[in-house]
Amino acid sequence: MSNLRSLVTLIVWVTLCLMIYLIPPNQSREDVPLLMEQNFPNDEEHLIDFGNFGYIIEQSPCESDTRGLIIVHTAPNNHEKRSLIRETWGGVVHSASSGSPLRLIFALGNIRNSSLESAILEEHSQHGDLLQGNFMDTYSNITYKHLMALQWFNYHCNRAQFLLKVDDDIFVNTPTLLENLRDPKASNSSNRRLLDGLIQQRSGLLLCAKREGDRVARSYRSKWRASFKEYSDSRYPDFCPGFTVLYSPDVARKLYAEAQRSPYFRLDDVHITGILSKRLHIPISDLSPYVMYPGEMESVLKGEEIPTEQVEFLVSWHNLNPSQMRSLWSLFGNN
């Protein structure tokens, strides 16, 4: 009789364990298994605590010869910004069929405006470069968008040697990127060779204009406020401001896996490239020498500084207006 009770108890415990394991996650929790290190079939169906994740607009996987993926974070109503990117620096890489070693995708979330959604679907039918997740596209959900980009790269473009995640208001020096991918030893400039070496780094790379020692905003008036419950320290660890982050595949995989099993935090750049990278002991390489900041850009556009062929940069600062974007493309688009 005691053996029968033991057997029944064992069966009950096994059943409970299986139920806990198989129920899809719908809330933030700490016990999500280390995804991407193992093959968990339900991984693509959630983003952290957002269950039943899926794509409203999907993308075909990268071709085997895709060397670099650029994912642009964009808002649904930023049609003009996307058009400007296609017209300028994104024009040489904007689709899977362009023959370029680079691939460009615009990432956005869901909306409740049916007319705007129809316009987005029409835009995608024309250009074929949108990736839309079914989470609502709000500022508080931006971490979902960031993680969607990492997930898509990990599952559908992981043969590429890097993921470049950018905002839709910056200029990317795609001619420099293309030259690096086609012939990384072509430049005679020592400074440019340092940049080429960083881009060619195949592992352990988290590259951005690093921020150090930022205080945590506590004011209710701040867009970036974090409560003590969300983050208890007074300063954030070093992190990447979200306008530009370049990941090697292994770093994208590790940060994605760690984010999937960590509680949600709405400041995506602080969370993914700061808190999680520190936890995983992933160092940040500084891109600052290769960012064209506003002062330098103003001088270059006025022709007051060095010749354009000597200006070595990968990306601009953010908040560019259309005139600045077009002017930069006219100067550097044919380099």
Image (cartoon, rainbow, N blue to C red):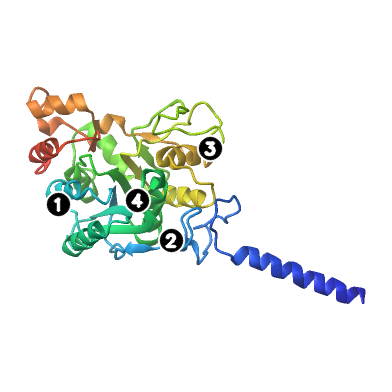
The kind of residue on which mark 3 rests is Glu
Disc 3, disc 4: CB below 8 Å?
no
First in sequence: mark 2 vs mark 3? 2
**Residue 109 shows in this picture:** yes
* SS class, disc 4: loop
Circle 3 sits in a helix, a strand or a loop, which is it?
loop
- In 3D space, how far apart are the residues under numbered discs 3 and 4 (Cα atoms)? 21 Å
Query: What distance separates the C-alpha of mark 2 from that of mark 3?
Result: 24 Å
Of residue 242 and residue 99, the one placed in the foreground of this image is 242
Badge 1 amino acid: Gly
Q: Residue furthest right?
A: 1
Tell which circle, 1 or 4, labels the residue nearer the N-terminal end.
1
**Disc nearer the start of the sequence (4/2):** 2
Indicate the position of residue 152 as horizontal and vertical percent values. Answer: 37, 58
Dot 2: element: loop
Q: Which residue is mark 2?
A: 53
Q: Earlier in the sequence, mark 1 or mark 3?
A: 1
* Direction from residue 38 to residue 97 in the image, left or right: left
| Label 1–label 4 contact, CB within 8 A | no
Instruction: Decide if residue 252 is on the left or right side of residue 69.
Output: right
Residue picked out by circle 4: 137
The residues bearing labels 1 and 4 have C-alpha atoms spaced at a distance of 25 Å
The residue wearing badge 1 is 91
Residue located at (32% from left, 34% from top): 287
Residue where numbered disc 3 is placed? 230
